Image (cartoon, rainbow, N blue to C red):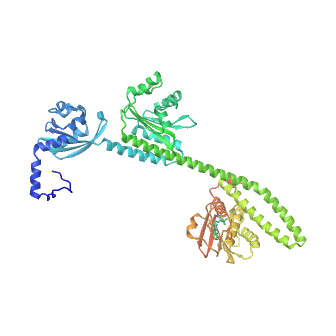
Amino acid sequence: MHRDRDGDEAIPPPPTASARDAEASASLTPDAVLDAIDGLVDGYFEMDTEYRYRRVNPAGLLITGKTRDEMLGKHVLEVFPDVADAAIHQTTMRVMETREAASVETFYAPFNRWFVNSIYPITGGIALFTRDINEQKVLEHNLAFLAEASKVLSSSLDTQQTLRTVAQLAVPRIADWCAIDVLTAPRTVELLAVAHVDPAKVEWAKELRQQDPVDLDRPVGLAKVLLTGEPEFYPEITDEMLVATAKDERSLALARSLGFTSAMIVPLTVQDATIGAITFVATESGHHYTATDLSMAQELASRAALAIENSQLYAASQRAVTLRDDFIAAASHELRTPVTSLKVYTEVMLRKATRGSDEAAVRSLQAMNNQIDRLSSLIVDLLDVAKIESGTLELRQEAFDLRQLVDEIVEVTQATLTKHRIDVEGDATLAVVGDRERLGQVLTNLLSNAAKYSPKAELILVRMWGDQDDVFLEVEDFGIGIQREHLPHLFDRFYRVSTPDEKTFPGLGMGLFIVQEIVRRHGGDLHVESTAGRGSCFRVRLPAHGHPGRDSAETQPA
Ligand code: ADP
């Protein structure tokens, strides 16, 4: 008797062990066991030692599609002649002989389903429990397919190619046919990929589509999915359905000849817009799609849509980067001419003012001249960045003495510095092969950074040395230094360490990027060591005999 907890009667105490045993033995009558067997959702089959069916429960009849009369008293091979060599029969015989329980998974083709069979020895024969594990198997299978397809989808940004691979993967695992369509120009449907179990039919399918394009004005099948963004699911394709959807007699005859058994069409949706669809069709396999298959197909479509979206975003960002680079290249090129004339006019005026002893004008014009120099060097850097990005930075290969170059650059730089002293240490001569002018630019850049970022220090050290293979050039300062977390990004394009006072350290973050590219293109590398608040040391390593990997085209000046 069932009583609610808040009912009037007190809850009876739990039965004692002996009461429980008595209850259990009372309910374990043979009739109760047989009732339980008949009520099982698993199929239950009992066979005698002669392999004749002795008992089958209703679920067993349902699974096998047989009647009791067709089975009871009959030999297993009489009922199922095609299982003689199958694992299930072999396992049954083993259990019968060894009297040891065993279990075997089987795919029974006539039912197109997976089962797990547990076989136990019982008095006078064996008992076999059969559980339909088809859904679970399909799920496992679909998940494995999804995992593989997702790997393909995330492997490249070339979506057209990856979608083609996905269609290939789907056949024959998921479908006998798989097609991927995309909406291109407004109201145009392009068959992007098609795969078939029989590759010979792929070309035929493409031709067919050309002759019979998707008609968006007839919202059935694929057209409906593309228009509504909702999947179409046909677990069972009947002849009436073919008649209802065929455009004309010719396409009806064709649809009939293809032998469709089941299909599903799922939309590819990117940012709420349907941009295409994936179609899965079962023909030869005789497969019928289930709700599990449909969810897998939708999941695949959403992953494919994500891949398409990613590649569209990537393409857009690439376009933006190209646009920016093109703009930088064009702008810096255009800026060069007016700045050059500005410089010429300012110098003329400066000379005049100096001759006329107009001190105020001289001061202003000198300041103007300095700013023009700064502007010119920014423009030159911008042009260099553009050249690096477009791969048009040309380098010479010439043998020269690095020490001589260093002395020249140090002399010129020193003349511009009022607070700092540059000391040079190292070999009196040091032969290298490379682009003298560009390597001079590397040193100029490192020296100007050293001075800029050490406003309170006096000394800047330049060291150079070499061995058989490499030459090294170091620029050390005792300035503000760089915090560790910035070091990995320091040579990135436009990377700057933000300082509390941007005015003290103006810049665009191009210098070290250019320096690193020049050094790299020489087959060398750039290294930095720095301690915040104590200073930085930049070291350039160059192969002493030029870049061994350079081809002759690169070694020629423009
Ligand atoms: P810019 O100096 O124009 O910002 P760079 O590419 O030359 O660009 O340098 C990138 C960043 O590296 C700078 O913003 C600066 O923070 C840091 N940096 C470069 N050289 C030094 C140095 N010698 N000492 C401290 N920080 C430096």
Question: Horizontally, is 221 left or right of 130 in the view?
Answer: right
Q: Can you give x and y, in whole percent of width and height, for residue 178 in the image?
A: 45, 36
Question: Horizontally, is 505 left or right of 311 in the view?
Answer: right
- Which residue is more in the foreground, 370 or 252? 252
**Quarter assignment of residue 292:** top left
Which residue lies most toward the top here? 249
- Report the number of numbered marks: 0
Residue ID at (74%, 65%): 374
State which image quarter holds ligand 1.
bottom right
- Which residue is more in the foreground, 461 or 283? 283
**Quarter assignment of residue 108:** top left
- Which residue is more in the foreground, 235 or 556? 235
Relative to 508, say whether 214 is above or below.
Answer: above
Q: Can you give x and y, in whole percent of width and height, for residue 323 in the image?
A: 66, 50
Q: Can you give x and y, in whole percent of width and height, for residue 278 in the image?
A: 46, 38
Relative to 540, say whether 11 is above or below.
Answer: above
Relative to 428, say whether 3 is above or below.
Answer: above
Relative to 47, say whether 511 is above or below.
Answer: below
**Quarter assignment of residue 297:** top left
Q: Can you give x and y, in whole percent of width and height, for residue 322 in the image?
A: 64, 50
Residue 557 in sight: no
